[in-house]
Amino acid sequence: MSSAIFIIGAITDEMRASLSPDFILHDVAQMDDVETWLAANGQTIKYVLTNGHDGIADDWVTNMPNLKLISNYGVGYDAINAQAARASDILVTHTPDVLNDEVATTAIMLMLACYRELRASDQHIRSGAWGAGEMLTLSRSADHRRVGIVGLGRIGLAIADKLTAFHANIAYHSRSEKDVPFTYYADLQEMAKDCEALIVITPGGDETKHLVSKDVIEALGPDGVLINVARGTVVDEGALVDALANGTLGAAGLDVFEQEPHVPAALLDMPNVVVTPHIGSATIETRRAMGQLTVNNIISHAKTGKVFSPVPECRDIADMA
Ligand code: NAP
């Protein structure tokens, strides 16, 4: 008999086509009342397919007594309680590596847009100012900057790689020092003080909440550029808005926000802020690769009991494909 998959959030047609021959798909989006549906059908669910934004509520998991695997369509899984899942022998998988280059490109794109004031330049033409012969004020170079990467993991390293094209002097902060040719700072505020730009790319969750604090933002300073492609919670958004408003921070490029899809209105009025709607990995090519890994974890588990990419919390109970 086909196993049932409980789908939270949107998936691509390609993912649906890969799964539908062998599984029964139940979409939360089609349910009038999820709790009622789970009370009647939760015991039929063997797999959950969700994403980094929606995750899954603990009480939904409790109502799926035969759940074996939560497959996350994304690398960040802070919206899933992976420790609780592990304690119940439920595997959690995610999509590391296949999105490193794309998210790094998004970070670099935001950094370039801040330094070269892309928004003002674009607006100069659209407003007719260029045609009317008005001068655009000069922007600043993105080359040869002292850039601090907050979180030198898979994506952080891809960002460092792309930054070398801009001759950046790279520093980094993470929990542990790495064997890399960049300057390590155990103290994030010290790094911010010594850098001109910070690029934030840690996981979200309680451990990193407001890691980029008011003090870190102020240490970056009035000419400083803050790029966040991690999770909105990693930066103290209130302090960020204040610092941009009173000039204690120079500019910000933000792909993520504390209460998505809400973006503080004050940020949208600031000419020195570039915002994107959490599109770090959102290209056709990269989402295809992420989608394949997401469904392959489920298909492989159903056929062989093995998975390709368990999260660290579940590695000890995972049979690797
Ligand atoms: P990763 O390989 O696990 O790297 C995470 C890095 O963050 C590691 O260097 C780790 O340090 C560091 N870190 C973790 N907790 C920390 C803490 N409390 N203080 C300082 N550093 C800390 O993860 P990844 O694959 O690069 O992904 C990173 C994150 O990017 C994801 O979890 C997700 O939240 C975000 N992301 C965003 C988008 C987007 O669309 N904007 C897309 C993909 C991913 P150690 O190595 O010392 O442990």
Image: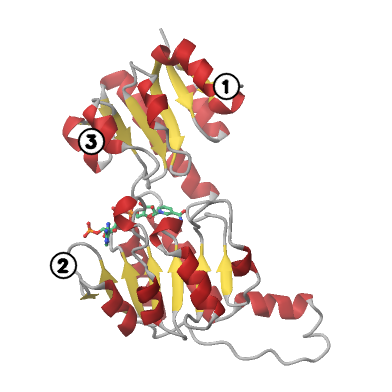
Disc with the residue nearer the chain's start (3 vs 1): 1
Find the distance from the CA under tag 3 to the CA under tag 1. 31 Å
Instruction: Give the quarter of the image for residue 162.
Output: bottom left
Seen at 80% across and 91% down, the residue is 133
Q: Quadrant of the image for the C terminus?
A: top left
Identify the element where label 3 is drawn. Answer: helix
Left or right: residue 267 compared with residue 211: right
> Badges 2 and 3: C-beta atoms under 8 Å apart?
no
Disc with the residue nearer the chain's start (1 vs 2): 1
Query: 10 Å neighbourhood of mark 1: few (<14), some, or many (≥20)?
Result: few
Question: On residue 196, which mark appears?
Answer: none
In this picture, is 111 found above or below 5? Answer: below
Seen at 50% across and 81% down, the residue is 250
Q: Amino acid at mark 3?
A: Cys
Identify the element where label 2 is drawn. Answer: loop
Eye-nearest disc, 1 or 2: 1
Left or right: residue 232 compared with residue 313: right
Query: 10 Å neighbourhood of mark 3: few (<14), some, or many (≥20)?
Result: some
In this picture, is 301 found above or below 197? Answer: above
Find the distance from the CA under tag 1 to the CA under tag 2. 51 Å
Q: Amino acid at mark 2?
A: Asp
Q: Quickly name the residue at label 3.
A: 314
Q: Report x, y in % for residue 238.
A: 49, 66
Q: Report x, y in % for residue 226.
A: 44, 73
Question: On residue 179, which mark appears?
Answer: 2
Question: On residue 33, which mark appears?
Answer: 1
Q: Amino acid at mark 1?
A: Asp
In this picture, is 53 found above or below 266? Answer: above
Find the distance from the CA under tag 2 to the CA under tag 3. 26 Å
Query: 10 Å neighbourhood of mark 2: few (<14), some, or many (≥20)?
Result: few
Q: Quadrant of the image for the N terminus?
A: top left
